[in-house]
Amino acid sequence: MSTTTKAAPIVHTPDFMNGDEFRIPVFKLLKQDGSPYKNAKLPDLDKDKALRIYRAMLFTRVLDERMLAAQRQGRLSFYMQCIGEEASVIGSTAALDDEDMIMAQYREQGALAYRGFDVDEFMNQLFGNEHDYGKGRQMPVHYGSSKLHYMTISSPLATQIPQATGYAYGQKMAGQGHCTITIFGEGAASEGDFHAALNMASVHRVPVIFLCRNNGYAISTPAHEQFSADGIAPRAFGYRMKVIRVDGNDILAVYQATVEARKLAVEHNQPVLIEAMTYRLAAHSSSDDPSGYRSKKEEEAWRDKDPVLRMKLWLQEKGWWSDDDEKREQESLRRDVLEAMKRAEKREPPELDTLVSDVFDEVTPILAGQLDDLKAHIRKYPEAYPKGAKSLNGKDAGGAKHA
Amino acid sequence: MPKMNMLQAINDALDIAMAANDKVICFGEDVGIFGGVFRATSHLQEKYGRDRCFNTPLVEQGIVGFANGLAAQGSTPVAEIQFADYIFPAFDQIVNETAKFRYRSGDLFNVGGLTIRAPYGGGISGGLYHSQSPEAYFAHTPGLKVVVPRNPHQAKGLLLGAIRDANPVLFFEPKRLYRASTGEVPEEDYELPLGQAEVTKEGDDITLLAWGAQMEIVEKASELAEKEGISCEIIDLRTIVPWDVETVVESVLKTGRLVVTHEAPLTGGFAGEIAATIQQRCFLYLESPIARVTGLDTPFPLTLEKEYMPDHLKVFEAIKYSINY
């Protein structure tokens, strides 16, 4: 049995290689003014789909602006913006079947918006109220939706990447023609889980798309301190995986690259790595201030490459969108977001019993006992535990149901 | 009833699980055509094909990450970690992902179909890295069930129970017993319940509690004790999480004395958790302090393994100390 997949040529001088032999091009279709490059063949994207994409981009941007403001006002504990990366996230999602699985990192709210997660669903999670699908257990932006095939976000970085390989293996076994896309940053790609995932996907021929948002920074650490190679793309060679580098701010390029990647994945069981070159215009999170590690000048240069503006200009050139449409949409989105925020803030917190449910499929006797003890304690000191006391007052005084 | 050793019983359980449900998929390092380094997965690839039983690259975090995703998708993965000593690269996937998948999503998603099998424990001259008993690390993480069988019959029934349980299960197999422990094992498909201890011998004077390979040790110690007129009740905990408090409490209320033994080191070992709970529940009934007979608070040794091990003589001494307290 050979130890490599190819017979190696033999040489007689000790020459070393470092990968610089490969030059990875960047796939682009649209210029920043919204016009196509000469010789660029644009993907077949109809008006309805184009507007669905654009509306998801606008919604994401309005949501991000409003929610960061809400965080600054002290109404929300934490927030993370997608600003600058909307095309990478939404363009790739739009290229998939709506039932393909998405396993994202945390900055991909645009994907959910595109799939139809509504503004109240966003708000309920952000405020961790009784209607939050995650029952108020995770920090803001940790969305999930089983009906929209969007895996609940997990804070530890890169853990979703090998999970995507496993999920997609199950889809391959099920044979219904679906795939999984996993989205992550260039920083997460340093984690061992990334390498494990790509190797296993390639060895086991799994229909999974790895989309790296190379946005220049992992919190404060610039890409050049993250890796010394030419970005993330060359890593695919080490796993003999198909790879493409795309302008992540070019919605049509991201869309088309992902359409082609999906064909390779679903029709040929070939995993694909897509490196989307983009820029995190926002701070890492509401707890971060980028002025300490990068220049305004650098940010401005990327602001000029705004992916949302680029798509708008293309839509206007097609005659599918006007400044009036833009104004109306923006106003209506702002109103929707503000009203939904007010509704979400007023909702009750999750019931006290949700502290111990879902640890296992059923509440174990030990957990039921711990909940009973906690309730007795809260009844003694209700002022110290206002949310728990409120939940207890509205409910019967019994313990958790258990098997 | 056929006689089997523990490996054959485990292999049989996997075979039955794969035959009964085509969503059961077995994988890990060397589990394919080779059948695993201990042969627990022998012939499964031949029978069920390379899609359902296969080698993975040598990457434990990848094996468990992959298994988490596969379970979330609705399959029933049975992932093998070649030695429990090598489970730590997967610690993040197990502790932060497997254990929290259902909770963090509010039950939108779960990895309940997942079983992780790993040979564990000493007594095979394996030294530091082929001997450890890591059950307490995982017992400290809510959301994981932890199961350890003591013999072939138990191994088959508990493994089938684990694979079909609606929660992720870590199934630690006492590798010292793989070939050493033989016994009658029913041919048919049967499950033993998780979360239930078993009283394997009734007695009046003292309760001996163990799991896995330590069950042999307490049985030997009880034989020595019986010769001195001490009547021992023996309990196999079987499931470490969620553990069967009531069965142990009931026994200790009767005997008034408890010895707990495990191979893992003393400090932070699961015996400490048991002792704390039992003293709380049985305080006024205890005739003597609860004794723990465990490994030392050292890495697992090689040449001096026999000295390190909590063997029957150490358990016997603990029994006498408790009785004479």
Image (cartoon, helix red, strand yellow):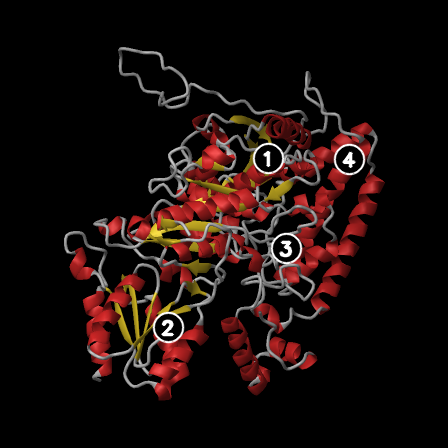
Image quarter (top left, top right, bottom left or bottom right) of the N terminus of chain A: top left
Left or right of residue A271, residue A309 in this image: right
Residue at mark 2: B274
Residue at mark 4: A49
Mark 3 touches mark 1? (CB < 8 Å): no
Numbered disc in front, either 4 or 1: 1
Which of A210 and B34 lies nearest the eye of the viewer? Answer: B34
Numbered disc in front, either 4 or 3: 3
Q: Quadrant of residue B43?
A: top left
Secondary-structure class at tag 2: helix
The answer as to whether the residues below labels 4 and 3 share one chain is: no
Q: Earlier in the sequence, mark 4 or mark 1?
A: 4
The amino acid type, in three-letter code, at marker 2 is Ile
Residue at mark 3: B108
Instruction: Point out residue A115 in the picture as x, y percentages from the top left corner.
Output: 71, 44
Left or right of residue B303, residue B137 in this image: right
Q: Residue at x 69, y 58 (%)?
A: A123
The amino acid type, in three-letter code, at marker 4 is Lys
Numbered disc in front, either 3 or 2: 2
Which of A360 and A353 lies nearest the eye of the viewer? Answer: A360
Residue at mark 1: A172
- Which chain letter matches label 2? B
